[in-house]
Image (cartoon, helix red, strand yellow):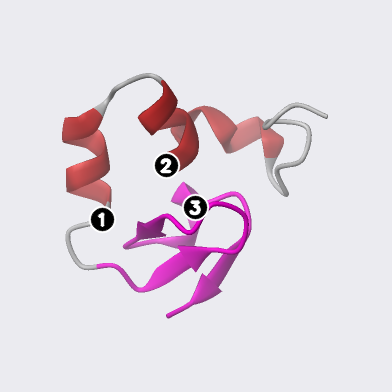
Amino acid sequence: MSEQESCATPTGHKAHMCQLKHEGRIEEIDRYSAKPKFACNKCGAKADEECYLCNPRPL
């Protein structure tokens, strides 16, 4: 199963932290995780908003 197929919101996967990291988009990662309130249950990435994670949970 691919990363995108295992994502809870595959239509938004291109903006998720794991995909940004895979593509080397570090500036976006820094911008979207400046004040994290959520973590991904899959990869552990942290983000300010749930919409940047595949399987978010509150911190």
Q: Residue at position x 23%, y 35% from top?
A: 28
Mark 1 closeness class: few <14, some 14–19, many ≥20 residues within 10 Å: some
Residue at disc 3, secondary structure: helix
Q: Quadrant of the N terminus?
A: top right
In contact (CB < 8 Å): disc 1 and disc 2: yes
Mark 2 closeness class: few <14, some 14–19, many ≥20 residues within 10 Å: many
Give x and y (percent) for residue 33.
Answer: 25, 55
Residue 51: assigned label: 3
**CA gap, disc 2 and disc 3:** 9 Å
Q: Can residue 54 be found in the magenta stretch?
A: yes
**CA gap, disc 1 and disc 2:** 9 Å
The answer to whether residue 50 shows anywhere in this view is yes
Q: Residue at position x 38%, y 19% from top?
A: 23
Q: In this rendering, would 49 be left or right of 1?
A: left
Residue labelled with disc 1: 33
Residue 17: assigned label: 2
Which amino acid, mark 2?
Answer: Met
Q: Could you tell which of marks 3 and 1 lies nearer the N-terminus?
A: 1
Instruction: Write down the region rendered in magenta.
Output: 36-59
Mark 3 closeness class: few <14, some 14–19, many ≥20 residues within 10 Å: some
Residue 48: assigned label: none
Q: In this rendering, would 21 be left or right of 31?
A: right
Q: Can residue 45 be found in the magenta stretch?
A: yes
Q: Could you tell which of marks 1 and 2 lies nearer the N-terminus?
A: 2
Residue at disc 1, secondary structure: loop
